[in-house]
Image (cartoon, helix red, strand yellow):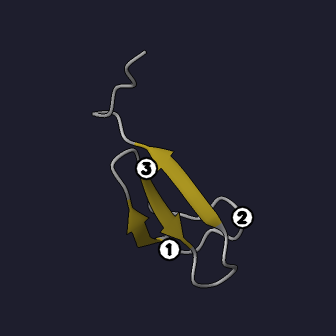
Amino acid sequence: MTQCTRCGGQLTYNDETTKLVEYACPTCHNTVIVQKESFRARA
């Protein structure tokens, strides 16, 4: 995940939690949130 889907610019690492990683585009300010594969929800 290195390119912005809106403008094609370079995404930068923005924030990270236990469940999610957030990337942001400095050009158009589009935010992409990706769920971590290693996280498993327990019911």
Give the residue number, with chain letter if any, for mark 2. Answer: 6
Q: SS at mark 2?
A: loop
At 40% from the left and 71% from the top, the residue drawn is: 13
Give the residue number, with chain letter if any, for mark 3. Answer: 20
Give the residue number, with chain letter if any, for mark 1. Answer: 10
Find residue 34 and report its horizontal and vertical position in percent.
48, 47
Q: CA distance from mark 2 to mark 3?
A: 21 Å
Find residue 27 and report its horizontal and vertical position in percent.
64, 84
Name the mark nearer the viewer: 3 or 1.
3
Determine which of the numbered discs, if any, sits on residue 33 in the image.
Answer: none
Q: Please state which of residues 7 and 13 is positioned toward the viewer in this rendering.
A: 13
**In the displayed structure, would residue 19 be above or below residue 29?**
above
At 43% from the left and 15% from the top, the residue drawn is: 43
Q: CA distance from mark 1 to mark 2?
A: 11 Å
Q: SS at mark 1?
A: loop
Residue at the farthest front position: 43
